[in-house]
Amino acid sequence: MAERERILKIRNLNISFKTDSGTVNAIRGVNLDLYRGETIAIVGESGSGKSVTTKAIMGIMANNGTIDSGSIEYTWHDENTGEVRTEDIVKLNEKQMQKEIRGRKIAMVFQDPMTSLNPTMTIGKQIMEPMIYHYGKSKEEAYAKSLELLELVGITDAEKRMKNYPHQLSGGMRQRIVIAIALSCDPYVLICDEPTTALDVTIQAKILELIQDIQKKKNLSVIYITHDLGVVAKVADYVNVMYAGKIIETGTIDEIFYDPRHPYTWGLLSAMPDLDTNDPELYTIPGTPPNLAVPVKGDAFAPRNQYALNIDLRVEPPMFEVPGSTTHKVASWLMHPNAPKIEMPHALKKRLEKMEKGGK
Amino acid sequence: MEEKQPILEVKNLKQYFKISRKFTVKAVDGVSFKIMPGETYGLVGESGSGKSTTGRSIIRLYKPTDGQIIFNGQDISGKMSKQEISMLRTKMQMIFQDPMACLNPRKKVMDIVAEGLDIHHSYSSQKEREQKVYDILELVGLSKEHANRYPHQFSGGQRQRIGIARALIMNPDLIIADEAISALDVSIQAQVVNLMKKIQKDFNTSFLFIAHDLSMVKYISDHIGVLHLGHLVETGTTEEIFSNPIHPYTKSLLSAIPVPNPHVEKTRKSLTYDHDQSDVDYTVGTEHHVGGTHYVLATDEEFEKWTKQ
């Protein structure tokens, strides 16, 4: 196997927002790695900090947010000289960021295609704009490339569509356009922030398959942000589960889906009905996520965790490596060698076993 | 055995919107189904298939172009008398998709929930009004103190509970839930669905559940209708639809559901159904009986072809 090429390396990222009700520590020490051609997914409830993390990577945080500490290192091959360069995005100023990274190296697909497209510009203009801006291409070159891109994202009649305005297209078409724009500058990394939440199931499947297809063709790295575990199962190689601004479990897709270790991951997997579910009541995680304006003591999930140990209320758990795996890590005191042995809920275990068998 | 009367019967409902002199959108074109008391009917389909329009026509937010809607034994599709309107507006309620957009941000929860009571004068004293609101809030899992807050002070799941409380306070026989859980997180979706199931068990309320998330629809519904381009292409019990889908559109819809199982999901490709290229004309098809309560819209040849596959 070829050596994996690391593109993004996030270490100990801390982000806080200043609000009227005090400082909110939205991201508390996130570590993340992304390798070339691979897909990672970040899952979690709303407010867990998934979007903030990726916005920090793009450098498009809200004005009241600051990166308190940590680094986001981005590695790429220089187009002209071919040498390997590494920059810490956190240290770049706005001008460098806009010129070098944003849009050009890292592109983003947003949730709602209607709000991310400009309603007063034609599709064609919007696809050509970044190429002209970033690479100084002539209009003719940009036009030819745009047609190619539209075909790549599966839009027929590309020439006719170039003259259309966003409101003339359906939701699925619009999202395809957004993807085409994101791909126009040949980025290395594509960040998809809930790319299919605003679309319905049939179109969702199509868009996900499209992104997978393009990823293979262009050897892209993709970061998915979603709360839909079905989507995660379809696309991701690695999964990061986020809760209250921390990654609490990370591992390969098989490790997370068939051998989850954190009680929160158990809860997420249990809450999702699959097509065989016919229990009288769906499982819900009790309680609500913590208020991050108040400093978190111990494990942020402890108040909602029926398996919480005493130590969970006092000391924050470090990342424990799951024995026998180099990729699977869990932030829970339950993984400590001295902790009492607690198995995942019986119903979930049975379901996961059945799933694992059914898939093979 | 005594024949049970359906709570709602929709016969050949048509809802057209005239855009200009030459152009009319046929949003719903001849839809018929029945909902029994205490039952949940799931209406699924892609965006633009007319699911929401159907729901809105039934509760008479639109005036239906043609067809009959029989609710509690009364025809509510034409011009209604005062009693009929008052019956419809109390006994049929709706829960909307976006809980932030459907609650008045300037009103307190108390007044939002009690609005129906105010309009229909269903209390004799302020104390009774308060008590009714408190009872209903408790039922949906909120507390008394919440009554004096404003909608923005709640989380998404709590807001949806307020929407449900507002629907429930009139003691409805039928609740139309129009994408009521689509805007919520997975874990909160489960809470709201559990609440709807509990209400159904306690009060024998019927639900018309409009959604595009098929795994949730399968979980909550007794009967399912698949809507496409304003036509009900397939209808039957949940079991019948999921175990034996006949119509190619239903098949493509079912194949598109993401399964939270990486082994299956990685290799699976969804089926495509392109209506323009399939030359299936919904207007010439008739209902074909598959078995039980399972019907599919097709012409004779189509029906033969689809069932053979």
Image (cartoon, helix red, strand yellow):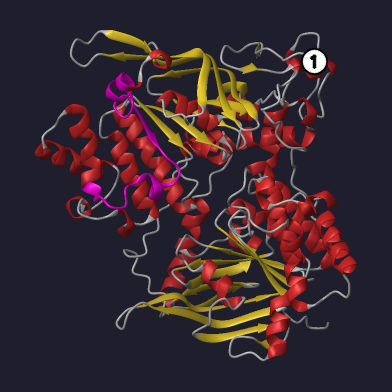
Quadrant in the rendering for residue B73: bottom right
- Return the residue at label 1: A314
Residue B154 lies, with reference to residue A334, above or below; the image says below
- Percent x, y of residue B180: 63, 57
Residue A24 lies, with reference to residue A32, above or below; the image says below
- Percent x, y of residue B155: 67, 45
- Percent x, y of residue A59: 41, 25
Say which element carries label 1: loop
Can residue A50 be seen in this snapshot?
yes
| Residue A115 belongs to the span the image colors magenta | yes
Answer with left or right where residue A333 lies relative to residue B54. Answer: right
Front residue of this view, candidates B220 and B84? B84
- Percent x, y of residue A297: 75, 19
> What stretch of residues is rendered in magenta?
A95-124
| Residue B238 belongs to the span the image colors magenta | no
Q: Residue at x 67, y 28 (%)?
A: A293
Front residue of this view, candidates B275 and B62? B62
Quadrant in the rendering for residue B248: bottom left
Residue A144 lies, with reference to residue B229, above or below; the image says above
